[in-house]
Image (tube, rainbow, N blue to C red):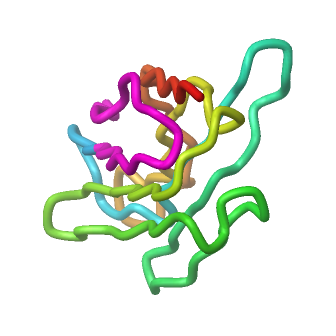
Amino acid sequence: VQLQASGGGLVTAGDSLRLSCAASGTIFSINIMGWYRQAPGKQRELVADITSTGRIRYSESVKGRSTISRDHAKNTVYLHMNSLKPEDTAVYYCNARIERAYNDVANDYWGQGTQVTVSS
């Protein structure tokens, strides 16, 4: 299983961007897909995630400024972020909890990370 993330880059405060992450490989089902981020010197933290039934969590720091969505047919998750702030600067990692076969144990997989830099 591989997670391929894209969409990061350098933006200006107040801008918007969209991150995408596609899962590929041997996949039976994806329970949760989401995004985490890690800023320099800080621990990795949840940004947002979405379950297979559509339940969504957002961190308080992005709630109201971000929308997570999922395309089940494409095994892809999107994170649209608005009103970006310099404190949103971090490496953003895609995460998915995947069952590779029926009744298999679900495991967590991570993408390679995509840098988001927000200049003031």
Tell me how many marks there are: 0
Confirm whether residue 1 shows in the render: no
Nearer the observer, 83 or 17: 83
Which residue sits at x=22%, y=40%?
Answer: 24
- Above or below for 50 versus 77: below
> Relative to residue 112, is residue 28 drawn left or right?
left
Q: Which quadrant, please, contains the C terminus?
A: top right
Q: Measured from the top left, where is residue 46 in percent x and y?
A: 70, 49
- In the rendered image, which quarter is residue 79 located in? bottom left
Q: Measured from the top left, where is residue 36 in percent x and y?
A: 62, 42
Asked whether residue 87 is drawn in magenta, I would say no
- Above or below for 7 versus 57: above
Nearer the observer, 107 or 6: 6
Which residue sits at x=46%, y=84%?
Answer: 54
Q: Which residue lies furthest to the front in this view?
A: 120
Which residue sits at x=54%, y=47%?
Answer: 84
Q: Which quadrant, please, contains the N terminus?
A: top left
Predominant SS along the magenta part: strand
Confirm whether residue 63 shows in the render: yes
Nearer the observer, 88 or 120: 120
Q: Measured from the top left, where is residue 105 in percent x and y?
A: 56, 54
Which residue sits at x=51%, y=70%?
Answer: 50
Q: Which region of the structure is painted magenta?
A: 1-21
